[in-house]
Image: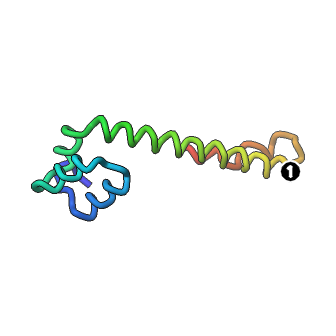
Amino acid sequence: MRIDMVITEEEITLIEKLDASPKTLEWLREKPRTWEDFIESHSTWILKHAAAHLLTLAGRLRVARSVGSTEVCRGASHSGADRGSSGDDLGG
């Protein structure tokens, strides 16, 4: 996706599902808008939504790593050689 592409109705529907305000949705539907228009006009909403999504994702990764390390410890010899591989690559 390039930022100069026009936002489709399908994408507006997805934005709506992300709890965009009625005013934002009206603005998006008023005339064809590009992603660049949206970023310039609604950057605060985009950043707040992105931050909330990242916090949710970080929480899920912590849980996954916690569960993964528990599973590894149950079956490992505790020598250290078996630890750390489960979930360590989840971040990147």
Q: From the viewer's side, name the closer residue of 65 and 44.
A: 44
SS assignment at label 1: helix
Q: Which residue is at 35% across, 37% downward?
A: 47
Q: Is residue 39 rendered to the left or right of residue 82?
A: left
Q: In this rendering, does residue 17 appear at all? A: yes
Q: Position of residue 58 (x, y in %)?
A: 55, 41
Q: Quadrant of the N terminus?
A: bottom left
- Name above or below for residue 25 compared with residue 84: below
Name the residue carrying label 1. Answer: 74
* Residue sticking out furthest to the front: 22
Please tell me whether residue 29 is drawn above or below residue 51 in the rendered image.
below
Where is residue 5 drawn, in percent x and y?
18, 54
Identify residue type, mark 1. Answer: Arg
| Residue in view at x 32 percent, y 41 percent | 46
Residue at 12% of width from left, 54% of height from top?
A: 30
Question: Measuring 80% from the left and 43% from the top, which residue is drawn there?
Answer: 81
Q: Position of residue 73 (x, y in %)?
A: 83, 47
Q: Residue 40 falls in which quadrant of the image?
A: top left
